[in-house]
Amino acid sequence: MEKSVTEAINYRRSVRIFNDTVELDDDKVVQCIKNATLAPTSSNLQLWEFYHITSKEVRLEMTKACLDQNAAKTAKQIVVVVARRDLWSERAKANLDFLNKSFGNKKKEDLTKREKFALNYYSKLIPSLYTEFLGILGAVRYVIFNSIGLFKPMYKQVRNSDMRIVAHKSAGLAAQNFMLSMAAIGYDTCPMEGSDTNMVKRMLGLPYGAEITMVIGCGVRDENGIYGPRFRVPFEEVYKKV
């Protein structure tokens, strides 16, 4: 029986050693990856990709890239979450095509104010935020937006580095969707921070603009797969009611 959201959250742990005898159902893992694609994403650009590694040979290579961590070495499958900020143009176009179809492919003069805003958002605002040239345009945006922000509330995180963070935040939300979906069906995961991301990119044939957000080992926990009891700082230290 599939766990509730709260049950899945409590069940999920970073499993360091996976059971060697229990295999994963590929289709179930794919469904969890589909769940990942339903995560919130900035401007609905969905600047992510998911690489589902089931080949034993590739997993062995991934183990090297993950610095021989047990979570990679014993994983039955590995999922790599990739941030694709470089795909912003085609993902914006996909949103534009979807909106135009949703609006009935109306002529410009027949569009409502809200519909015009939505189309302008992807055809004008998104390009103004994501277009870059050697970091120069981002610096110019930063000066302009912060100058306007002196007089009224204004979004100011518009530099090249800021847009990288935006893409990774969305990819991270998707990764959490994936891991909780796995937990809900009794599968385990371990997000591995320690990895040679350049090596991972070469293995997957990724272009320069792609960036690794997370490498996730997958399997079913071994008896000794969790290294210790869960520790969290007291809730009162992190909860601030305003």
Image (cartoon, grey):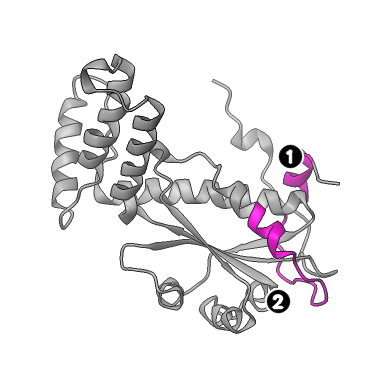
Q: Residue at x 60, y 50 (%)?
A: 34
Residue 28 rendering spot, x and y as whole percentages: 71, 57
Residue 89 rendering spot, x and y as whole percentages: 28, 48
The amino acid at mark 2 is Thr
User: Is disc 1 placed on a helix, strand or loop?
Assistant: helix
- Of residue 128 and residue 34, the one placed in the foreground of this image is 34
Q: Residue under label 2, please give it.
A: 74
Q: Residue under label 1, please give it.
A: 5
Q: Residue at x 53, y 46 (%)?
A: 173
Residue 11 is covered by the magenta coloring: yes
Q: Is residue 176 visible?
A: no
The answer to whether residue 88 is left or right of residue 134 is right
Quarter of the image where one finds residue 59 = bottom right
Q: Is residue 68 visible?
A: yes
Residue 35 rendering spot, x and y as whole percentages: 61, 47
**Image position of 174 with respect to 99: above or below:** below
Magenta segment: 4-31
Label 1 to label 2: alpha-carbon separation = 27 Å
Residue 3 rendering spot, x and y as whole percentages: 80, 44
- Of residue 160 and residue 210, the one placed in the foreground of this image is 210
- Of residue 52 and residue 190, the one placed in the foreground of this image is 52
